[in-house]
Amino acid sequence: MFGLIGHSTSLAEADVATVRLGFPEYSGHGLDFWCGAPPLLADKVRVTSPTGNVIEGQYIDSCFLPEMLTNNRGKTAVRKVLNAMAQAQKCGLSITALGGFSSIVFENFNLSRMRQVRNVSLEFEKFTTGNTHTAYIICRQVEEMAERLNIELSKATVAVCGATGDIGSAVCRWMTSHADVEDLLLIARQRDRLETLQGELGRGKVVDLEEALPQADFIVWVASMPQGVQIDPKVLKKPCVIVDGGYPKNMSTQINHPDIYVLNGGIVEHTIGIESQIMQIIGMAEPARQIFACFAESMLLEFEKWHTNFSWNRNEITVEKMEKIGAASIKHGFLPLLPHTAA
Ligand code: NDP
């Protein structure tokens, strides 16, 4: 059995989600309540592969909220992630994805030092960040949109916001050695880390967001921001493809322009369908078929019986591993989400 550890994107969303999930007692409280709440075994999940294999899993809401990071509740965030992992292990789950901020909290607070959670000794090999599959799907979203819009990637400029992150650096590696884009713009706050990445890639320009936006044919947003940023669509190139892989979304702007294509990044569609109610509660457009690519990674590892932490640590995702999980993704019926209206 596989596992998915997730969380709501805000306190307001958590209030609505818990009622829909059948836990009304969790709704209508403030952040303090959520800080004290134990993880919720919130939903069962069932997936059928085109190969005929059927797997089952468990969705666990860690009761973490991004507001915990902006309100100096770092220790609470740590507790949320560790308790959810211990819960997954107690349920006997073979492989569990750490969705959204779970893996970011794990890394940023160095939780590999904290293996013992009460009477549970965490076995990290039973967990995956899901970031290899997420990075692969984002790259495929860029490549498929390029094909639809007749944009040659070898003549295109791709900007990656969050370039030094786990997903962002993997996207950069793919865009350099696999897609061979003309220009790669690297954006994040810490310049030294950007320069290290630039050195590793042997290419790419370190630029500010304001400088990057007017130049980019494709913008990949994978920054770990608790809240989205506003951007002015007037400054963007036309056409321009924006792949927003952030959770919560990196962009808070709604864009309605025929030549600007905004994609829900790092999302897959399953050809047969996924039996669970969680994606409906999260507000996925087609909840019976769509799911986060990181969650799908734990499904792929379960289908293939690769019960190992396929994506682990930071900035170690190789193009070869992306190709490997990509092949499993295709085999088991997952497709990158693309807009139904594009060209
Ligand atoms: P990391 O923490 O590894 O990397 C985050 C990156 O964002 C770093 O480059 C960081 O660099 C940069 N960053 C953070 N804040 C800002 C800011 N304000 N402006 C510009 N850059 C910023 O995160 P991950 O790669 O693990 O995850 C990235 C995003 O993807 C998150 O939103 C996460 O929730 C989402 N995600 C989506 C999944 C899906 O299935 N769709 C799966 C997993 C994650 P610096 O600190 O120098 O600014």
Image: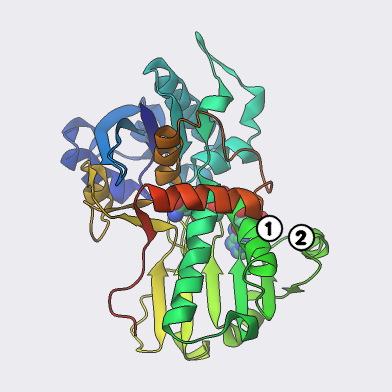
Residue 214 appears in which quarter of the rendering? bottom right
Q: Is mark 2 within 8 Å of ligand 1?
A: no
Residue 61's spot in the image, x, y percent?
35, 35
State yes or no: discs 1 and 2 in contact (Cβ < 8 Å).
yes
Q: Indicate the position of residue 49 as horizontal and vertical percent values.
A: 30, 43
**Quadrant of the rendered structure where residue 263 is?**
bottom left
Where, by quadrant of the figure, is residue 116 drawn?
A: top right
The residue at the point 38 percent across, 30 percent down is 2
Considering only vertical position in the picture, is 304 above or below 147? above
Amino acid type, residue under disc 1 in the picture: Thr
Residue named by callout 1: 164
The disc at residue 8 is: none
Image quarter (top left, top right, bottom left or bottom right) of the C terminus = bottom left
Would residue 283 be found to the left or right of residue 174 on screen? left
Marks 1 and 2 sit apart, C-alpha to C-alpha, by 7 Å
Q: Residue 199, relative to residue 101: is it above or below?
A: below
Crowding at mark 2 (Cα within 10 Å: few <14, some 14-19, many 20+): many
Q: Is residue 141 visible?
A: yes
Q: Amino acid at mark 2?
A: Leu
Q: Is mark 1 within 8 Å of ligand 1?
A: yes
86 with respect to 338 (left or right)? right
The percent coordinates of residue 193 (x first, y second) are 77, 57
Which one is nearer the viewer's eye here, 20 or 289? 289
Instruction: Point out the residue furthest to the front here.
Output: 51
Residue picked out by circle 2: 197
